[in-house]
Image (tube, rainbow, N blue to C red):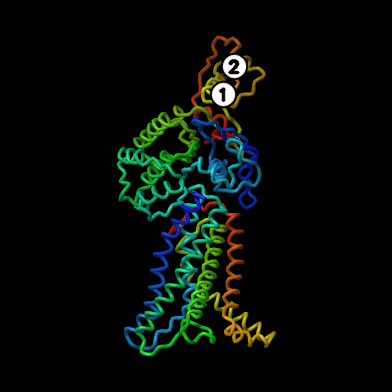
Amino acid sequence: MMKYKAMLKLMLGWVFPMVAMTSVGWFLLEDGLPLLTGSHFPASNWPFACTFLGFLGAVMLVSVFVGPGFQFGVSRYTMTRAYATALLIQAAAIALMALGLQSVAELFAAQRQSVLVPFAGFIEPSITALVVSVAYLAMMALVGGSVGLLFGLLLAYVTRRPMIILLVVFSGLMPMLVILIAMLSWWGLTSLWPAVKAWPGYFNQHPWLIVGLWGVLASVLLLLMRAVYLRLDAPKQVGWHG
Amino acid sequence: MLEIKGIEKKYYFKPVLTGVEMTIQPQRIYGLLGRNGVGKSTLLKVITNRARPTAGTITLDGVSVFENEQAQNRLYLMSDARLFNQDSKLKVLLKWVDQLYGGFDYALAEKLARQFKLDLKKAKLRRLSTGYQTIANVIIALCVPCDYIFLDEPVLGLDANHREMFYQALLATYAQRPRTFVIATHLIEEVAGLLNDVFVMENGQVALAESVEALQQRGRVVSGPAALVQDYLQGIKPLREVRLGGMLTAYTLDTPLERPLPAGVSLDGMNLQQLFIEFTREAGEGDEV
């Protein structure tokens, strides 16, 4: 328990500044510049941003903590627990940051338009809409984080050198890969089974269902991450360089 | 007591450890010797849970150490693996160690840092030279509150003065707080004076486990006229024989000290390094240059 608490504390000391920096960075790039130049209404794709920021945070977590975990005699079980908890907290922090930053953007926007809540049933602001939005964004961040963790640990498993540089490069490629896979899957599914085209509309009417589905996906990914970590030997080296 | 039984380890189907058996007693200083690639570092990684064994058991006072944090909290491995964030300041690193092990000896760390002229407060690991990175790792290893400290090549990159300072520091901290040290090194001559016992590894196994005193007692160089030396060592297979004309020099671990030494035959001792070289020499190795 001592090592779990200590490791989690160290991870969170890394997670919070990381989330603050990356989400503000994203916001400035995506919304800040258009706002300053007045070119168009800012419209961050926050669900996508949360997935990406979750992924980025997770690969950083792997790179920074997988070494000390082994160096300081922390068991693999404890490390997977600490990683999972840190990812959950990171996901919540990313969702709240996204919400806060979007609110800032809307304050400055000439025309109020909610782009945060992606569901048809929640166009009007309400407490339920807020809760669903945060839960949805957090799940997206958790899915991104789980993929990042799994990816980082697989890299550590195969190469025994989970370098940050490699992870960051791949974290740039990963969203493109995910989008490509999603597009191909959608095309394949709708070609084979046209009734699938009605699904997005259905999910829009039942937002909790989609939150739940993302949650299930994140849980499966976290279980896979655990399976990889339990088979992991200490890497030879961690950090920026190979 | 740390008991290692039948430890095997394969990396991608390549066997590195092939059935290691050893017992490490509390409060002793051991040398873990072996030629390059025999599995010394891998064995230390397996003991400290960094690498998963393919087979075998390791117990600390009867309890398995694998995935056991209570047991692992009593073991510490210092190696050249760069598992810390290299951009961390040393003071942050020490704080991490303290949080994860508890009871880190800051006073000793500061004292050692002063001796080695290392600034713990400002220095960052990445900016240190190889030697000073080793010094930082050594300081941590000497100040963690663990009962079993494993040092894998602890003087890598250290100059002769710093090596001497390290050996003195190790003995001083050992005298103040006796615990077990297992030192894996190739600088046998330098550490020989520190060691109580040695393990010599060959082909992924422990081939020799003995106290330094007993080993030095057993290891002898017998030289003289070939016929007389052969007669003296009758029934004994030396580690190596070197013939020069009619003279024979035999290196052996089984000197028959009870037999009377023939006139013209000399009997000399072997230091630990010589003994190691003869013990681990492969057939034909070094005969031709």
The crowding category of the residue bearing disc 1, from other C-alpha atoms within 10 Å (few below 14, some 14 to 19, many at least 20), is: many
The crowding category of the residue bearing disc 2, from other C-alpha atoms within 10 Å (few below 14, some 14 to 19, many at least 20), is: many
| Residue depicted at x 58% and y 23% | B252
| Residue depicted at x 56% and y 61% | A154
Q: Position of residue A182 (x, y in %)?
A: 58, 78
| Residue depicted at x 61% and y 80% | A184
Label at residue A194: none
Residue on which the image places disc 2: B229
- Which callout, 2 or 1, points to the residue nearer the camera? 1
Image height of B125 relative to A126, above or below: above
Kind of residue at disc 1: Tyr
Marks 2/1: CA–CA distance: 11 Å
Callout 2: residue from which chain?
B
Element under disc 1: strand
Residue on which the image places disc 1: B251
Residue A90 vs residue B276, the one in the foreground:
A90
Kind of residue at disc 2: Val
Element under disc 2: helix
Q: Position of residue B254 (x, y in %)?
A: 60, 21
Left or right of A175 in this view: A240: left
Q: Going by the picture, which residue comes out furthest to the bottom?
A: A111
